[in-house]
Amino acid sequence: MKEITAVNTEQPPVSPPVLRAADNEASGLSTKVNRPRNISIRKDSRSTLWLPLGFGLLFLVIWQLKGFHKLFNLELYQLPIPSAIAKAIQANADLLWNYSLYTGLEMIGGCLIGSAIGLLAAVAASFIPQTGRGAITLLAALNAVPIVALAPVMNNWFGDGVASKIAIVSIMTMATMAVSAYKGLRSVEPAYLELMHAYAAGKYTIFLKLRFKLALPHMFTALKINMATGIIGAIVGEFFISSRGLGFLLSDQIKLGNMPIAWSCIVIAAVLGIVLYYCIQLIERVAIPWHVARRKLH
């Protein structure tokens, strides 16, 4: 029985070259398996880039050929074609540039201030979860306040300068950051918390090393939303009491019936929002390369 046991349990030694060959073979198989996946990811990234560009180019061609005019029975004074808008931008480049900087200052300043206040509110609410959720809900109610009703009040409080428009954008963006950041700070898996407690980590250490880092994707999402929508608050605020900015110029030129310049303001405002959106996205890629949304791109 002893001899049989020895023969059955004894394993032949495996030499290191065999292990290396097996590892190489496995790695070769994994490379062969992953190679088509990488190619498909590149194709997906190219399609996500070229499809919107192609659609946008087709949209401009149809617009230039007056396709929308025929479809919706519009006249050129109601909807200028892209070439007329481009000529208006070229002819009024200095004025549009100065007004764009003015509106951009209101937008960026309001977004940063509102996002900072919303983040502070979310951090404070995360340390007192019993009452913090209710406070965040009340703060989110600010989104229900119409901008048309908010703009005259802010103009009355802060005057007709930059401060009133910054205040409007701040109120618009505050709730988005507060809700998103609070959700990120509180959505930590229990296993992570148990691990931090096992290392005897304190409340503030857990916040800095765990909660805050896991909430960064939510914060950047809120920033991108704020940058894309903050331009609305700045322009609407300029509709009421202002002597500069894209909103003032848009309202003034619509009253005068100068639609190419009015549409130039709309195009520039849209481009400004898109550029700031992608700036935040670029910062996000640098700040949180470990996020799953970034890893899928590699």
Image (spheres, rainbow, N blue to C red):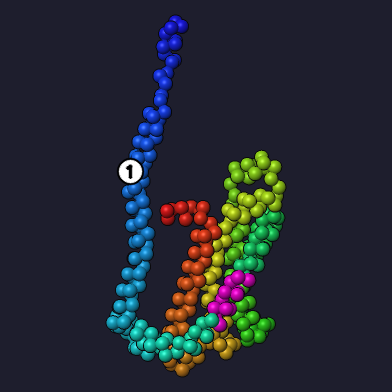
User: Along the line of sight, which residue is nearer the eye, 222 or 10?
Assistant: 10
Q: How dense is the environment of label 1, judged by Cα within 10 Å: few (below 14), some, or many (20 and up)?
A: few
Q: Is residue 109 shown to the viewer in this render?
A: yes
Residue at horizontal 37 percent and vertical 54 percent from the top: 41
Left or right: residue 24 compared with residue 185: left
* 64 in magenta: no
Image height of 103 relative to 252, above or below: above
Q: Is residue 47 left or right of residue 184?
A: left
Q: Secondary structure at mark 1?
A: helix
Residue holding disc 1: 32
Of residue 200 and residue 136, the one placed in the foreground of this image is 200
Instruction: In this rendered view, identify the residue nearer to me: 248 or 210.
Output: 210
Relative image position of residue 168 (x, y in whole percent): 61, 77
230 relative to 62 in the view: left or right: right
**Quadrant of the rendering where the N terminus is positioned:** top left
Residue at the spot x=45%, y=87% of the render? 93
Say whether residue 219 is left or right of residue 260.
right
Magenta residues span 102-113
Residue 149: % across, % down = 60, 80
Position of residue 251 relative to residue 114, above or below, is: below
The three-letter code of the residue at mark 1 reads Lys
